[in-house]
């Protein structure tokens, strides 16, 4: 949480407003997952996860940022997918840094994300430390993601790796980087399908957002609408550089975020009732 947001949280806590947050909201970062078989429920942007799991802690090539947020939980298929990715990058002497996955029961988050709700989304930083660099957990607790202007070879490889994985449903990436990947499609040897999975979205100048497919045994998991036709490099990419797109990219105040959060909690499907439990 950045300092500005922390300020809002503190102000809010002191001067409680008309729309009170529910009691469980204070324990979102520390609650334990449900003791159930693992199921991804609902939509990526309106769902939850039953029986979430996390990393053992000795995985190679993976670093988890901001563990204090408690957003390092996911469906076992996501955890395995990332564990495998870590070992691939580790062989090339690189670590990948994972930002947020989901909360212990998934569901809406008060700050930071619209999606990441059903244990199938992960943010992966562009920053990739060499394995020789001793980065401490502590460092990552305080370090912020750093925006970048251009993609270097490591970052292109990172994107290419994730785009090439069958399990990946789509990747959200900064429109400027998407444009670059469109221009360099031949050089990067990106297939049509790999290019197509990468979709422009606001922000994402310090990380990519990787989303995996609904697990076959998660019957309540709602697959995302199919990717629109085309590889995302044509006319629809131009829109991202329009005034309309820039105007739509506005930061919400904490009050607005709270309203959105409460609205989402109310709209959660009934099979996510455990999200609203205090323990
Ligand atoms: Zn994300």
Image (spheres, helix red, strand yellow):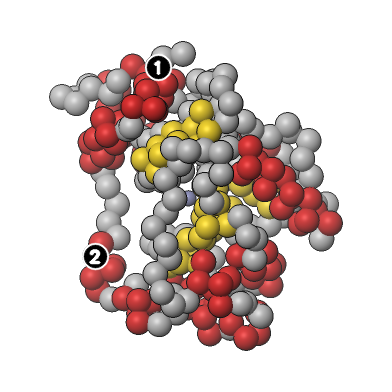
Tag of residue 117: none
Q: Front-most of 119 and 255?
A: 119
As drawn, 33 above or below 108: above
Is 130 situated left or right of 182 in this image?
right
Residue 192, given in percent of the width and then of the height, sits at 56, 77
On the question of residue 133 being in view, the answer is no
Ligand 1 has an atom within 8 Å of the beta carbon of the residue at disc 1: no
Who's the residue at 23% across and 70% down the image?
244
Marks 1/2: CA–CA distance: 38 Å
Question: Dividing the picture into quarters, in which one does residue 107 lie?
Answer: top left
Q: If the image is split into quadrants, where does the N terminus sit?
A: top left
Ligand 1 has an atom within 8 Å of the beta carbon of the residue at disc 2: no
SS label for mark 1: loop
Badge 2: how crowded within 10 Å, few (<14), some, or many (20+)? few
Work out which residue is located at the far left of the displayed protein and give it: 18
Q: Earlier in the sequence, mark 1 or mark 2?
A: 2
On the question of residue 187 being in view, the answer is yes
Residue 274, given in percent of the width and then of the height, sits at 42, 21
Residue 199, given in percent of the width and then of the height, sits at 45, 66
Residue 277, given in percent of the width and then of the height, sits at 40, 17
Tag of residue 277: 1
Who's the residue at 33% across and 16% down the image?
23
As drawn, 198 above or below 71: below
Q: Please name the residue that numbered disc 2 is placed on.
A: 247
């Amino acid at each position: 949480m950045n300092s500005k947001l922390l300020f809002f949280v503190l102000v809010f806590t002191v001067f409680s407003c008309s729309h009170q947050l529910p009691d469980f909201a204070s324990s979102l970062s520390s609650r334990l997952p449900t003791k159930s078989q693992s199921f991804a429920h609902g939509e990526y942007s309106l769902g939850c996860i039953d029986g979430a799991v996390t990393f053992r802690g000795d995985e190679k090539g993976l670093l988890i940022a901001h563990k204090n947020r408690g957003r390092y939980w996911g469906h076992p298929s996501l955890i395995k997918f990332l564990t495998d990715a870590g070992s691939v990058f580790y062989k090339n002497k690189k670590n990948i840094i994972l930002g947020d996955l989901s909360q212990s029961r998934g569901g809406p988050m008060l700050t930071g994300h619209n999606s990441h709700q059903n244990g199938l989304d992960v943010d992966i930083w562009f920053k990739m430390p060499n394995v020789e660099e001793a980065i401490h957990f502590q460092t990552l607790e305080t370090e912020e993601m750093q925006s970048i202007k251009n993609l270097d070879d490591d970052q292109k490889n990172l994107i290419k790796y994730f785009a090439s994985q069958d399990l990946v449903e789509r990747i959200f990436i900064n429109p400027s980087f998407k444009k670059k990947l469109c221009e360099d499609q031949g050089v990067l040897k990106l297939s049509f399908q790999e290019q197509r999975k990468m979709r422009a979205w606001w922000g994402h100048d310090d990380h990519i957002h990787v989303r995996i497919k609904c697990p076959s045994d998660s019957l309540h998991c709602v697959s995302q609408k199919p990717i629109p036709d085309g590889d995302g490099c044509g006319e629809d990419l131009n829109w991202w550089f329009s005034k309309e797109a820039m105007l739509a990219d506005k930061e919400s105040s904490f009050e607005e975020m709270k309203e959105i959060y409460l609205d989402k909690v109310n709209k959660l499907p009934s099979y996510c009732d455990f999200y609203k439990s205090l323990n």
